[in-house]
């Protein structure tokens, strides 16, 4: 799928429309998540935790060259998800980074006054999502030190 999507983009200059599916696949592969059934309303994947299953919404953006000024797809606040993952993909649809933000942080970010896209459509910019959450993959040296000490 990655090769087909890349070839289509090179031929037409238009995306094939599989970024969301590729982000879900990459998150499941990298983080060991179980994907929900197709078109499950309210979440995309399940993470096993010591406290039980955690429902996750997964969003993806293809960010060629690391440009982060794009918007994340609409986040439905009515969904059953407990956290949202943002998977950033390179031009070949390989994950480069994964960020996570919990429900409270997403609600707070979406309800800040000022932006029609944010307030009316439930969309955050990539940089806004990063600010609301934290990078969970790849883990940097400072994050590994915190994880092992806490």
Image (spheres, rainbow, N blue to C red):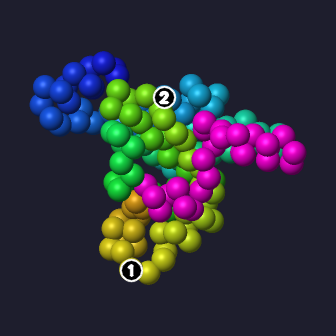
* Residue 46 location (% of width, % of height): 63, 38
Residue at x 38%, y 29% (from the top left corner): 93
Q: Nearer the viewer, residue 53 or 127?
A: 127
Q: What stretch of residues is rendered in magenta?
A: 126-150
Q: Nearer the viewer, residue 60 or 52?
A: 60
Q: Nearer the viewer, residue 74 or 6?
A: 6
| Residue 37 shows in the view | no
Residue at x 15%, y 35% (from the top left corner): 13
Q: Is residue 3 left or right of residue 39?
A: left
Q: In this view, which residue lies farthest toward the left?
A: 12
2 vs 1, front mark:
1
On whether residue 52 falls in the magenta region, the answer is no
Q: Which residue is mark 1?
A: 114
> How far apart are the alpha carbons under marks 2 and 1?
34 Å
Q: Which residue is mark 2?
A: 25
Q: In this view, which residue lies farthest toward the right?
A: 149
Residue at x 63%, y 65% (from the top left corner): 104
């Amino acid at each position: 799928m990655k090769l087909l999507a890349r070839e289509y983009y090179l031929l037409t200059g238009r995306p094939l429309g599989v970024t969301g599916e590729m982000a879900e696949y990459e998150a499941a592969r990298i983080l060991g998540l179980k994907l929900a059934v197709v078109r499950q309303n309210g979440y995309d994947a399940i993470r096993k935790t010591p406290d039980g299953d955690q429902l996750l919404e997964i969003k993806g953006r293809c960010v060629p060259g690391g440009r982060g000024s794009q918007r994340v797809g609409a986040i439905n606040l009515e969904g059953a998800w407990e956290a949202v993952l943002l998977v950033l993909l390179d031009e070949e649809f390989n994950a480069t980074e994964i960020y996570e933000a919990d429900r409270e942080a997403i609600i707070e970010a979406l309800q800040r006054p000022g932006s029609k896209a944010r307030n009316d459509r439930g969309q955050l910019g990539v940089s806004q999502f990063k600010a609301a959450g934290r990078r969970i993959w790849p883990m940097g040296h400072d994050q590994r030190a915190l994880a092992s000490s806490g």
